[in-house]
């Protein structure tokens, strides 16, 4: 009997840590281009590594050590990637915070991870100042883009990004292994605040290795990044795989449908990602004869709508590689480059993961084409999340029966191709963001004129995503203008979570156990009594 073969050998997984990746590329391809802002002159791999060593030295001078959590609130920029790498060179833990968070949303994540130091762009400092009395652990702020000593308010020691850059470089990175904790990324909860997903380097590597293998990524590729770098998609499915193979990464401020193709051409991108409704937005642009004249060969899509998938590939002369995954387990299914398009399919499982469809009540395996819950387990160690931070009960619940339960519904055909159906969790998906209905309700319910409320997803005009609707019972005798309630929400939650639709109702349907029957509210959808901010001519401030 032949000995069993490790699917992902230790030497492969060991190379996934940030310190080993940067050191190896600086040694093997020192002068090759690595990371650039839009079309500016890129840093070479040697320059990237040396820059991060200086930043790491500056963070160590501020007391950052192995295992410390370092939060950052930074928009897409060179600084957010450099912060991520510098933190990991110290064997510390990156905790990227959504730049749209404020108030209780911000407080929860910074306190939950117990970050003592945060790296924050000057435009977001006021958000920290507004809640400084609620931030329990934070003692130091590093300010990007401003003069830290000149910033007033807050109770912290203030430092500038320039101080880190000028610091004495770290002699060598702190040793890390693929199963060591690299980051905590927060994902929306369904019955409570967002959960911190504790990720070893192996999860980032799992994400990255999938891209490298299915997209046949090489050092000749250029990755065009417009998705937010405080999310795992841009970090682990674009930046990390590209740098692991010695490719070039072009970072952009954000997505623009009208400039997408122009930007792809200007940076020479051969690969990019398109999540949420991005494919729809790009496809809806006026078609031109030269749309296919671009350097792209692959777009990683989550998903491309089935009704436009074939024509999207034809029009832009690309392959759309659909996938399915979660922050906790990485991307576990893909369409391969040499496989024909199956509209609506998220591909088949990678060889290092088991993916099944089970009865959501019994976990019994379901037959092909029957809809059930998507569950996942690894075939090798260290490639999925360690736990939910400070939430052992939720960790055990998610991993019951030794399978990770995604909370998503889908089916699998006879050939093993996965088709995502719906979310069994009470999550609203909008503009590429997962929105916890609990968090929306927590804000709306604090309005003095609101008695009770329930937030639900309703279909968007833009295809495979949602809009937020909140159903509200006003307090007796109170009159509340929907525009006033909308403004109240806009000042207290991220722009993407602010409800588009508001409807006042007399009763919220519930079960005998007092659980809200959101399926009833979803079935009602948009009614003649629903207020719509777009119809009212109101825009949300970012």
Image (tube, rainbow, N blue to C red):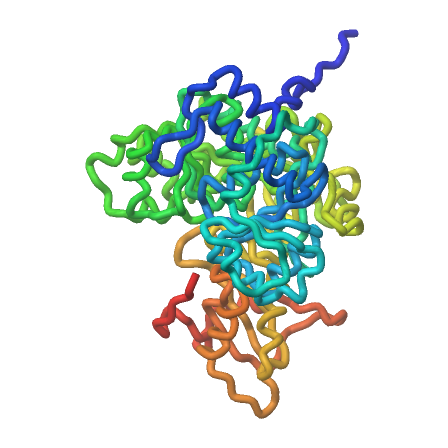
Is residue 234 depicted above or below 538 in this figure? above
Please tell me which residue lies in front, 519 or 236.
Answer: 236
Residue 36 appears anywhere in the view: yes
Please tell me which residue lies in front, 471 or 445.
Answer: 445
Please tell me which residue lies in front, 100 or 504.
Answer: 100
- Residue sitting at 80 percent across and 51 percent down? 393
Residue 366 appears anywhere in the view: no
Q: With 399 as the anchor, is 450 left or right in this view? A: left
Is residue 292 depicted above or below 108 in this figure? above
- Residue sitting at 52 percent across and 27 percent down? 49
Please tell me which residue lies in front, 196 or 158.
Answer: 158
Question: Which residue is the extreme one toward the left?
Answer: 289
- Give the x, y percent position of residue 162: 49, 43
- Residue sitting at 54 percent across and 68 percent down? 492
Question: Which residue is the extreme one toward the top?
Answer: 1
Is residue 377 depicted above or below 193 in this figure? above
- Give the x, y percent position of residue 172: 63, 25
Q: With 311 as the anchor, is 90 left or right in this view? A: right
- Give the x, y percent position of residue 48: 49, 29
- Give the x, y percent position of residue 42: 39, 30
Q: Quadrant of residue 190?
A: bottom right
Image quarter of the C terminus:
bottom left
Q: How many marks?
A: 0
């Amino acid at each position: 009997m032949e000995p069993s073969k490790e699917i992902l050998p230790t030497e492969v997984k060991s190379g996934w840590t940030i310190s080993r990746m940067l050191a190896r590329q600086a040694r093997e391809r020192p002068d090759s281009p690595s990371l650039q802002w839009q079309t500016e002159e890129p840093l070479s791999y040697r320059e990237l590594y040396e820059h991060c060593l200086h930043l790491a030295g500056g963070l160590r001078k501020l007391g950052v050590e192995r295992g410390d959590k370092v939060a950052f609130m930074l928009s897409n920029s060179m600084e957010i990637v450099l912060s991520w790498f510098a933190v990991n060179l110290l064997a510390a833990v990156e905790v990227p915070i959504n730049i749209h968070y404020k108030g209780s949303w911000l407080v929860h994540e910074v306190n939950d991870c117990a970050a003592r130091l945060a790296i924050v762009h000057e435009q977001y400092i006021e958000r920290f100042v507004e809640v400084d009395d609620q931030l329990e652990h934070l003692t130091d702020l590093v300010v990007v883009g401003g003069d830290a000593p000149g910033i007033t308010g807050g109770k912290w020691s203030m430092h500038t990004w320039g101080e880190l850059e000028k610091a004495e470089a770290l002699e060598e990175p702190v040793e890390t292994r693929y199963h060591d904790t690299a980051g905590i990324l927060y994902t929306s909860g369904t019955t409570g605040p967002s959960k911190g997903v504790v990720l070893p380097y192996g999860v980032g590597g799992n994400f990255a290795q999938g891209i490298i293998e299915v997209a046949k990524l090489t050092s000749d590729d250029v990755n065009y990044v417009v998705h937010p770098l405080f999310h795992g998609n841009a970090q682990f499915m674009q930046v990390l795989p590209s740098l692991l193979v010695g490719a070039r990464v072009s970072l952009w401020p954000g997505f623009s449908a009208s400039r997408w193709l122009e930007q792809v051409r200007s940076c020479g991108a051969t690969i990019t990602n398109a999540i949420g409704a991005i494919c729809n937005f790009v496809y809806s642009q006026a078609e031109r004869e030269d749309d296919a004249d671009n350097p792209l060969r692959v777009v990683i899509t989550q998903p491309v709508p089935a009704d436009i998938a074939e024509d999207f590939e034809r029009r832009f002369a690309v392959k759309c590689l659909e996938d399915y995954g979660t922050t906790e387990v990485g991307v576990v299914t893909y369409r391969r480059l040499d496989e024909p398009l199956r509209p609506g399919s998220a591909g088949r499982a990678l060889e290092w993961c088991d993916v099944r469809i089970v009865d959501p009540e019994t976990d019994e395996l379901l037959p092909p084409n029957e809809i059930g819950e998507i569950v996942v387990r690894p075939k090798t160690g260290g490639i999925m999340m360690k736990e939910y931070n400070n939430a052992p009960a939720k960790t055990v619940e998610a991993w019951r029966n030794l399978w990770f339960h995604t909370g998503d519904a889908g089916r699998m055909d006879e050939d093993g191709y996965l088709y995502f159906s719906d979310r069994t969790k009470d999550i609203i998906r909008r503009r590429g963001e997962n929105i916890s209905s609990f968090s929306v309700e927590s804000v709306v319910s604090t309005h003095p004129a609101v008695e009770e409320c329930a937030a639900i997803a309703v279909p968007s005009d833009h295809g495979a995503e949602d809009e937020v609707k909140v159903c509200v019972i006003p307090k007796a005798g109170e009159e509340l203008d929907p525009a006033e309630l909308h403004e109240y929400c806009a000042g207290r939650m991220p722009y993407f979570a602010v409800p588009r639709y508001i409807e006042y109702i007399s009763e919220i349907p519930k079960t005998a156990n007092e659980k809200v029957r959101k399926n009833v509210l979803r079935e009602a959808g948009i009614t003649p009594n629903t207020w719509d901010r777009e119809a009212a001519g109101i825009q949300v401030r970012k």
